[in-house]
Amino acid sequence: NAGVTQTPKFQVLKTGQSMTLQCAQDMNHEYMSWYRQDPGMGLRLIHYSVGAGITDQGEVPNGYNVSRSTTEDFPLRLLSAAPSQTSVYFCASSVGAVGNQPQHFGDGTRLSIL
Amino acid sequence: SQQGEEDPQALSIQEGENATMNCSYKTSINNLQWYRQNSGRGLVHLILIRSNEREKHSGRLRVTLDTSKKSSSLLITASRAADTASYFCATASSYNTDKLIFGTGTRLQVFP
């Protein structure tokens, strides 16, 4: 039972490069979310999805794009990487609305922007 | 903006002692959740307490919720070195349960 799988685990980019962080879940969960975690701070919501084909912005969406073409996958795209996007990124899924159901997290992608 | 704020930011105790962490939030909520994060790992859900509950237990965990004060506490009894981790509260507004807002967390260190 894999749960939520994030790839890659580590990545170093140069300013201006683009990349996609992958997230896949095998629990048939409708809700998926992307968070970033910076030192001394809790998790901040970037984008979320309540089902295939439906996405919405979170607290810190600028510089990121998402799409949800399948229930299983929810990739996060950095359009033009900036040093301020250096962070640890977590993907999470839940069977229902995140306020009412436990979220299952991946182990994160550690991203450094030079 | 962060909806949940936790205190203390850091807590160091000896094995066998109890650890108490507090969380405050700002808006009306349906539920409050607590999560644990071991170093270098993702968050793991511990417990969910509903707004009409005042206290909930799960093993060595006891969670209280005071909606009039918009606050919650997590008590870990008889702590173990393996409890060393960061602990986060998380809430969603009653008006939008699609967004979960996390607190800044409490770092707990349990010494053997």
Image (cartoon, rainbow, N blue to C red):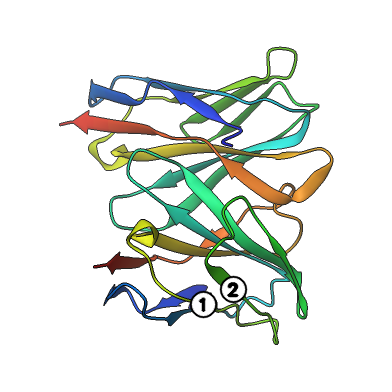
Circle 1 crowding by C-alpha within 10 Å: few under 14, some 14–19, many from 20: some
Q: Position of residue A41 (x, y in %)?
A: 41, 40
The relative height of residue B52 versus residue A24 in the rendered view (above or below) is: above
Which residue was labeled with disc 2? A65
- Of the pair B54 and B94, the residue shown nearer to us: B94
Tag 2: residue type?
Asn
The reply, left or right, for residue A74 in relation to residue B74 is right
The relative height of residue A98 versus residue B18 in the rendered view (above or below) is: below
- Of the pair B6 and A65, the residue shown nearer to us: A65
Which residue was labeled with disc 1? A77
Q: Residue furthest left?
A: B112
In which quadrant will I find the C terminus of chain A? Answer: bottom left
- Dot 2 falls on a residue whose secondary structure is strand
Residues marked 2 and 1 touching at CB (< 8 Å): yes
Q: Position of residue A43 (x, y in %)?
A: 49, 48
- Dot 1 falls on a residue whose secondary structure is strand
The reply, left or right, for residue B32 in relation to residue B102 is right
> Which of marks 1 and 2 precedes in the sequence?
2
Q: Residue at x 69, y 71 (%)?
A: A29
Q: Position of residue B33 (x, y in %)?
A: 61, 39
